[in-house]
Structures are given as C-alpha cells and as structure tokens.
Amino acid sequence: MSTSPILATPSAAASADTRAVLLNQVSWGAIFAGAVTALVTQVILNMVGVGVGLSSVGTTAADNPAASTLSMGAGLWFVGSGIVAALAGGVLAGRLSGKPVAGTAGLHGLVSWAVTTLVVLYLLTSAAGGLIGGAFSGVTSTLGGAGSLVGGTVQTAAQAAAPSLSKIANPLDGIEQSVRNQAAGQDPQAAKDAAVAAIRALFTGDPAQKAQAETRAADTLAKAQGIPVDQAKAQIQDYRKQYDETVAAAKVKAEAAAVTAKSAATQGAFYGALALILGALAGFLGGRLGAPQPATLVAGYDARRV
C-alpha cells in the first residue's frame, strides 16, 4: 500500500525543521575552545612583540628609536596580534562547531571573539589583571636595564604628547625670591617674612580689599628694603605685571595640555573601536574558513561506525 502524500508532507517538514535547528544550534564548547586559542595566540604574539621592541632599544639614547615611532609600532603590533588571534580562534571555533553551514560557523567564530574580548577586558580591570601585571613586571626586571630604557621611552612619549602641568612655575615663587633677596634692616629674616606675607596676601587675598592690601604690602616692603613707599608701590606694580604674565603663561599651557589630552583620548577611542571591529570581522571570517565540509562530516561519521 502506497504512502499518502498528505501524511508524508508533515513528516518531511518536521525533518527539515529538525535539521535546521541542529545546524544552527550553538556549540559553547567550540566557542570556549576558540576563545582559549585566541587568548594564547595573542599572548604569544605580544611576547614576541616585547622581544622585538627590547631588541630595538640600545644602551644609549642615541641608539634608541624615536618615542613616537616606538609607540606607533607597539600599537600596530598589538592591533595586528589581536586580529591574528581572533582569526585563529575563529577558525578553531568554526571547525569544532561541526556546522557545515558557513554562516553558522562564522557566527561561532564571532562569539568566540566576543568571549575573548570580555576575558581580556576583565583581566585588565580586575585583581587578576594586577596579578598578571606583577608577573610581567618580574619578567621585565629580569631583563635588566632594557626594561628601564623602555619605561623611559614610554614616559618621554607621554611627556611629548601633553605638556607637564607639574613644570608650570608658581607665579609667586619668583616674586617671593626677589623680595627675600632685597630685604634689609636690623632683623632681615623677620622683614623678609613680613614682606613675603604681605605680597602673598595682596595677590591671593580678597579682591574687594585690594586697595588696603596694596597699601599694607607697600609699607611692609618699604620697611623691609629701606626704600620710600612710592618706590615700593612702583615695585609692587612690577610684581603685579610679572604675576599676571606668569598666570597667563600657565593658563596657555594648561589649555594646550587639555586640548592635547582630549585629542589623544578621542583618537585612542576611535582606534580602539576600529581594532575591535577588525577583530570581530577576523573572528567571523575565521569561523567561515573553519566550517567543516558536509563530505568531511559524513566520512568521519562513517569511519566511526566502522
């Protein structure tokens, strides 16, 4: 008796649905295996990069490459190693997923890259990252002076990227030094301290009491240096001009440092996003490349049956 087409159609549809579910089912074992492979690959490549970087550092400053060149090379190597690691992890995740569909295997590679990225971020922002950093510090210390040269080069690059605000002079330092050098009288030290305190109160005190503070500063400065009050007032005006010029210079340096830091942070964010996108594409492409062929799966299944 022949099978009715009405009964055969639901059975075929159910079989197709089951096959679709199996082909698109997530294989977390393959994903984690790909993530582990990507992490180990990136560690190996980064260690090779450290070795190459240390080999390019000489014993003298003249033998060392420019700070910008070293920083750019290190950044490109880190991004390149991340892409290669994502590709390797994606290939393994796609192959172990057992999915002969290239798109599904590619998604396994993409998820493997995502897991790898989360693990790296966790290591960089947790106590585990501190332990790893301590281990690498021990490796660096065994390398001797080369590690110090690398650290000095990185510090030089940071200082070149943004002016150091710590080097901005205190606008009162030069004025106070000038007052102390010109103090006289029976008790020079007391006269110096009184004049310095009066000058500091004039420039840092309440602006509403500026006139009174200026009068006191002129009287104190005149007594400390043994000069007329009018001459002391003229000297205070010179100090005020010097103070304003120093403050203006400090403001310009601070604004330049803020602009440079903002530009560096913006570029770093964009470059980081670009690196992540390239890593994601590499993971997906690796998964597609690692997708097993249907003939390979059938041959392996038949071999196990025998």
Image (cartoon, rainbow, N blue to C red):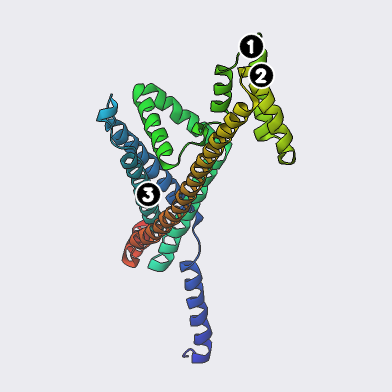
C-alpha separation, residue under disc 2 versus residue under disc 3: 67 Å
C-alpha separation, residue under disc 1 versus residue under disc 2: 8 Å
Percent coordinates x, y for residue 296 in the rendering: 32, 62
Q: Which mark is residue 185?
A: 1
Q: Amino acid at mark 2?
A: Lys
Residue position marked by numbered label 3 in the rendering: 79
Q: Is residue 164 left or right of residue 225?
A: left
Of the residues under marks 1 and 3, which one precedes in the sequence?
3
Residue 26 in sight from this viewpoint: yes
For the point 39% across and 49% down, the residue is 82
Residue position marked by numbered label 2 in the rendering: 223
Dot 3 lies on which element? helix
In this view, the residue in front, 304 or 256, is 256
Percent coordinates x, y for residue 218 in the rendering: 66, 27
Percent coordinates x, y for residue 255 in the rendering: 51, 46
For the point 45% across and 63% down, the residue is 107
Of the residues under marks 1 and 2, which one precedes in the sequence?
1
